[in-house]
Image (cartoon, rainbow, N blue to C red):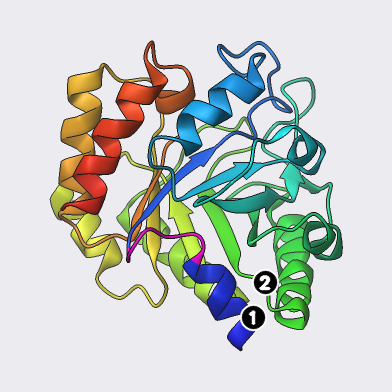
Amino acid sequence: MYGKRIRFDRLLHGDKMLCVPLDHGVTNCDIANLSDFRNTVSQIVDNGASSIIVHKGLVRFLPQLKNTGLIVHLSASTENYKPVKKIIVCEVEEAVLLGADAVSIHVNLGNEFEKHMLSDFARISSDCQKYGMPLLAMMYNRNNDNTDIGNTEKEKHSIRIAAEMGADIVKIGSNWSLDNLKVILKDALIPIVIAGGDMLDREKLFALTKNLMGSGILGISFGRNVFMSKNIADTMRNLSSIIYNY
């Protein structure tokens, strides 16, 4: 499908992905630098982001995305009530009208709400096929209390589920050694991007990125470690250099 291929290519620089998710404000509004949204986004897109992720309402506040793909996030929950349960708050057709290059959904496996999120996943995937829209699936193994329950086999299964359901890219957590990550990725049918997770100091962040890129992933999807950093532009320049020159 040519439309999907064209949109997919807009998410990359060359053949690598440096994605910055900025959807955190729905879950928790009190996050450093997201209040100064325009300035934060400008520093991110001007210093090498191949794509960003936002909720539909923030598209109108974005600067011009000259060389950065736009991913509209379709899932949400807040810290006020069962954050593990993600619901659909935007449809693929809305994302098309907003000019999105892709959409993303968040699915938590291993809890009582899994079946509802998988049902939403199936419907969104069908709509993405209809509109030629790339789909990024954020797949995590989490208990009812939203704590991680992942292990190597569960992670491999979550990647397989994403492929079986029609996702074009799958995003997983970063709590893996390089050896374990290579096992997880060994039989993956679709490209993988890795989440940033908890805040790291800059040297650990850059070392992690180098190790991750050595596993054969498509790229990274770092949110808080980028937009909550003390120097966003410098962080982005360093990450860009590591990823695109690996």
28 vs 93: above or below: above
Horizontal and vertical percent for residue 196?
Answer: 39, 35
66 vs 27: above or below: below
Magenta stretch mostly in which secondary structure? loop
Q: Residue furthest bottom?
A: 1
Q: Residue at x 46, y 53 (%)?
A: 171
| Residue 213, numbered label | none
Horizontal and vertical percent for residue 198?
Answer: 40, 24
Q: Which residue is drawn at 48% across and 61% down?
A: 170
| Residue 133, numbered label | 2
Horizontal and vertical percent for residue 85?
Answer: 73, 41
Asked whether residue 40 is in view, the answer is yes
Horizontal side of 63 relative to 92 (left or right) equals: left
Q: Which residue is drawn at 62% across and 52% down?
A: 70
Kind of residue at badge 1:
Gly
Q: Nearer the viewer, mark 2 or mark 1?
A: 1
Q: Earlier in the sequence, mark 2 or mark 1?
A: 1
Q: In which quarter of the image is residue 40?
A: top right
Horizontal side of 213 relative to 36 (left or right) equals: left
Asked whether residue 168 is in view, the answer is no
Residue 236 magenta-highlighted = no
Disc 1 is placed on an element classified as helix
> Which quarter of the rendered picture does the N terminus lie within?
bottom right
| Residue 3, numbered label | 1
Horizontal side of 189 relative to 237 (left or right) equals: right
Kind of residue at badge 2:
Met
Residues at discs 2 and 1 in contact (Cβ within 8 Å) = yes
Q: What stretch is highlighted in magenta?
A: 10-15
